[in-house]
């Protein structure tokens, strides 16, 4: 079924082939993307997603087509035209279209696409059962703090996880755990959270940031430091966070059960408080 598509300021559907073959996003991966969730056609954490997009575009010197207000208006119109209530919006902004050359022209009009799509968010059963993960090598480029469309390293990790009967791949480098292929990673040890600090090795996850805030508000200590690979063998709990999964318990790593393969108490508490915060954000 065709989805509603925003393309360079107009609305069409995903049936229309809109991109040229010399779009730099297609040929060079010269593009950023964003994904936000909507519930009852109301976007969750829209400002946070815009802010990350805006920062990434500025860092890569890609012209930002939207002010915060224009972005919100375009997204609300997209959701107004959407025929279902809950789902995700995928947004991609490339530097633009130009005759293929590594040297990009200074003044390019960005190519902007956004479409809404149905999405099956995890239900209460899945949220309790959690997911299994594997560990693999982080094969990504050096600017993982940007939400770049260069996702081949991530996709290779995910495919490896799927073939191993797992849901997600934890990406390791230099003996440390960085994050999931499409999620942030948290360990729980002695009642405290451990998660990788914000730097070029991980994406600044919107849910990661909210969860840290919720933990601190509940007097749960948060250590933002890289977790050594060896520490994976001695965790009390672990979980992933992402826009599409919220807070998702990890029940096994590389086939080893974490404790008794049950959602831990800290994970459960943060999962519940995050879901409430998200509902509030989508209401506002
Ligand atoms: N890390 C990576 C590599 C991701 O691709 C994602 C989401 O797609 C995340 C973390 C989680 O980010 P967010 O919480 O903003 O969805």
Image (cartoon, rainbow, N blue to C red):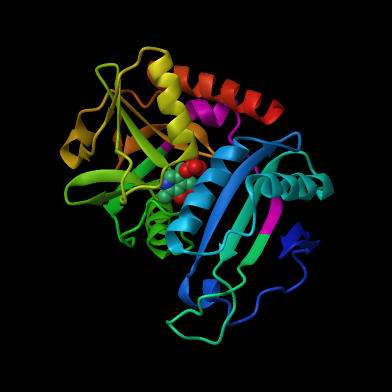
Check if residue 127 falls in the magenta segment.
Answer: yes
Q: Is residue 194 visible?
A: yes
Between 33 and 86, the one lying in front of the other is 33
Residue 253 pos. (x, y %): 31, 39
Q: Please tell me how many numbered marks the rendered image carries.
A: 0
Between 282 and 86, the one lying in front of the other is 282
Residue 118 pos. (x, y %): 70, 47
Drawn side of residue 284 relative to residue 25, left or right: right
Q: Is residue 167 visible?
A: no
What residue lies at 58% left-to-right and 46% top-to-bottom?
50
What residue lies at 61% left-to-right and 31% top-to-bottom?
123
Between 112 and 234, the one lying in front of the other is 112
What residue lies at 53% left-to-right and 44% top-to-bottom?
51
Residue 115 pos. (x, y %): 70, 56
Quadrant where the image shows the C terminus: top right
Quadrant where the image shows the N terminus: bottom right
What residue lies at 79% left-to-right and 43% top-to-bottom?
84
Whether 139 is drawn above or below 222: the answer is below
Check if residue 195 falls in the magenta segment.
Answer: no
Residue 239 position by quadrant = top left
As drawn, the residue found furthest toward the front would be 107
As drawn, the residue found furthest toward the top would be 219
Q: Which residues are magenta?
A: 114-131
Whether 20 is drawn above or below 176: the answer is below
Whether 241 is drawn above or below 79: the answer is above
């Amino acid at each position: 079924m065709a989805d509603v598509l925003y393309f360079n300021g107009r609305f069409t559907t995903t049936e229309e082939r809109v991109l040229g073959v010399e779009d730099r996003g297609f040929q060079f991966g010269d593009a950023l993307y964003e994904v936000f969730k909507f519930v009852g056609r109301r976007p969750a954490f829209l400002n946070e997603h815009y802010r990350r997009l805006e920062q990434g575009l500025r860092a890569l010197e890609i012209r930002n087509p939207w002010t915060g207000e224009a972005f919100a208006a375009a997204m609300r119109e997209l959701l107004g035209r959407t025929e279902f209530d809950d789902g995700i919006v995928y947004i991609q902004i490339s530097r633009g279209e130009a005759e293929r050359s590594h040297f990009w022209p200074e003044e390019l009009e960005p190519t902007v696409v956004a479409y809404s799509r149905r999405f099956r968010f995890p239900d209460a059963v899945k949220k309790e059962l959690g997911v299994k993960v594997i560990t693999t090598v982080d094969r990504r480029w050096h600017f993982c703090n940007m939400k770049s469309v260069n996702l081949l390293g991530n996709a290779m990790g995910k495919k490896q996880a799927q073939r191993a009967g797992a849901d997600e791949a934890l990406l390791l480098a230099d003996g440390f755990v960085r994050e999931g292929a499409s999620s942030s990673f948290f360990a729980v040890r002695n009642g405290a959270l451990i998660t990788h600090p914000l730097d070029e090795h991980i994406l600044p996850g919107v849910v990661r940031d909210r969860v840290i805030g919720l933990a601190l508000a509940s007097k749960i200590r948060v250590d933002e430091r890289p977790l050594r690979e060896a520490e994976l063998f001695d965790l009390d709990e672990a979980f992933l966070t992402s826009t599409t999964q919220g807070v998702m318990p990890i029940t096994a790593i590389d086939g080893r059960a974490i404790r008794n393969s049950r959602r831990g108490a800290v994970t459960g508490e943060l999962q519940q408080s995050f879901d409430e915060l998200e509902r509030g954000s989508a209401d506002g």
